[in-house]
Image: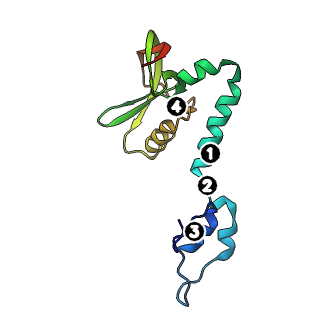
Amino acid sequence: MTADNHETEDVEEFHRSYLLNDEECEVEHDRFSEKKNYRNKWNRKEKRQESQYESNEDDKESENKSVEKTLIKEFSNRVCFSLEPVTECRRGFESEKTSSKKLRFTCMPRHSQNARRFMKEARDLTILDLADFPVSYVEAVKIPTACVAY
């Protein structure tokens, strides 16, 4: 919703509607037109979801039941991320069978900028590329091999 209560899908129009235009403030209009200044979080998520479905069209049944993601382990002063993606059951499904798998984790201070950024990306169902980070520890984790609706 713009400042004058009109609905719009144009991010630039939305942004411009909240600008104060007077003699005291000078607006750099050319900067608003640069598309690099606007990132649409929703479109990125939709594209990511579409690409997931396109890449696994042959296996739609298992695609609907499980998802691969980076596993996060939170501790009081640090956050650890799995270096390899793990399979988890999607919302509305639970694991029927599990297997144990040893996973390597990398850890970083909870307050670090990287930790906050990686946590946000991992929660957005992004598989993180952490190959350049050192292994902090290895842990056996139970991973679902079959997911069923409950």
Q: How far apart are marks 1 and 3 (CA)?
A: 19 Å
The three-letter code of the residue at mark 3 reads His
Of 109 and 65, which appears nearest the observer? 65
Residue with the mark numbered 4: 133
Q: How far apart are marks 1 and 4 (CA)?
A: 26 Å
Q: Distance between the residues labelled 1 and 2?
A: 8 Å
Residue with the mark numbered 3: 15
Q: How far apart are marks 3 and 2 (CA)?
A: 12 Å
Of the image marks 3 and 2, the number of the one nearer the N terminus? 3
- Residue contact between numbered discs 1 and 2, judged by CB atoms under 8 Å: yes
Image location of residue 116, percent across then percent down: 44, 44
At mark 4, the secondary structure is loop
Q: In this view, does 40 lie to the left or right of 115?
A: right
- Residue contact between numbered discs 1 and 4, judged by CB atoms under 8 Å: no
The 10 Å Cα crowd at callout 1, few under 14, some 14 to 19, many 20 or more, is few
Q: Distance between the residues labelled 3 and 4?
A: 38 Å
Of the image marks 1 and 2, the number of the one nearer the N terminus? 2
Of the image marks 1 and 4, the number of the one nearer the N terminus? 1
At mark 3, the secondary structure is helix
- Residue contact between numbered discs 4 and 2, judged by CB atoms under 8 Å: no
Residue 85 appears anywhere in the view: no
Residue with the mark numbered 1: 44
Image location of residue 21, percent across then percent down: 56, 84
Residue shown at 46%/15% (left/top)? Answer: 143
The answer to which quarter of the image holds residue 12 is: bottom right
Of 145 and 104, which appears nearest the observer? 145
Task: Tell me the mark number nearer the camera, choosing from 1 and 4.
Answer: 1
Residue shown at 47%/24% (left/top)? Answer: 135
Residue 58 appears anywhere in the view: yes
The residue at the far bottom in this view is: 23
Image location of residue 147, percent across then percent down: 49, 16
Residue with the mark numbered 2: 39
